[in-house]
Image: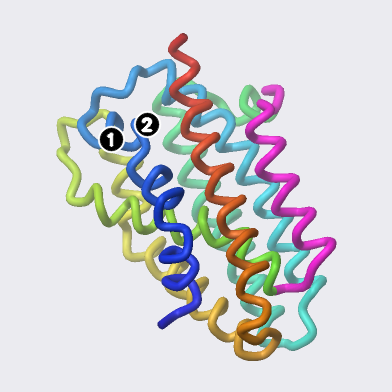
Amino acid sequence: MALFERLKLDNKDIWTRYTEHDFVRQLDVGELPEVCFRHYLGQDYLFLIHFARAYALAAYKSETLTDIRHAVDGLSAIVGLEIDLHVKFCADWGLGEAAMEALPESVETMAYTRFVLEKGLAGDLLDLHVALAPCIVGYAEIGRALSPSNISNPYAAWIDMYASKDYQRVAIAETEQLDRLFGLRAGEGRFGVLSKTFAQATQLEVAFWQMGLNAAN
């Protein structure tokens, strides 16, 4: 079984709370309050900047050209695909890039992004990728689950972005990298620690969704 699937199975309760969160359910049927989505979009922009930094850290932590190339591909996917799409998408919701850059980071944004960076700084490349995986692969899973989207849904473009073949390829590459790193850098004795990191990162994803919902209060 692939490492990612093992990590999901070992943390199935928190994974379900993440992928089937009320934020996701309301987004799927187009009933998410706009104030919640706009708040999420602004914080997600800041979040993606830090994830780009995490991939830069992955390149630094790499010891082979293969791993460096994977890190560069990931950084390019975030900066050249996901952030660009995010900025274009946000413009349709009246959110300019300069305004998003000026937003204060929420506690949830700070907690999640610093957790990932700390795991990468304190651990090795495998630790960093396990911390990144719930976001990278989780969004692909959510995109597939919600696709095909209803064109009358105001959030259809967001769903389509993460259901797209381009993003699905990014997620597949991440799961393959996890398996490769686990084979090179780990054994079964390390699985428990990796599973704990995965659970913590997934819990922070749950908190990020909840942050968006709380904007309506």
- Kind of residue indicated by mark 2: Phe
Q: Which residue is mark 1?
A: 25
* Labels 1 & 2 near each other (Cβ < 8 A): yes
Q: Quick check: 39 above or below 123?
A: above
Q: Residues within 10 Å of mark 2 (few under 14, many from 20)?
A: many
Q: Tag 2's secondary structure? A: helix
Q: Is residue 104 magenta?
A: yes
Q: Which residue is mark 2?
A: 23
Q: Nearer the viewer, residue 71 or 10?
A: 10
Find residue 198 and report its horizontal and vertical position in percent. 58, 59
Query: Quick one: quadrant of the N terminus?
Result: bottom left
- Kind of residue indicated by mark 1: Arg
Q: Main secondary structure of the magenta part?
A: helix
State the CA–CA distance, disc 1 to disc 2: 6 Å
Q: Residues within 10 Å of mark 1 (few under 14, many from 20)?
A: some
Q: Nearer the viewer, residue 40 or 133?
A: 133
On the rendered structure, is 126 left or right of 210?
A: right
Q: Nearer the viewer, residue 171 or 83?
A: 171
Find residue 151 and report its horizontal and vertical position in percent. 16, 37
Magenta highlight range: 102-125
* Residue found 44% across the figure and 63% down from its top: 8
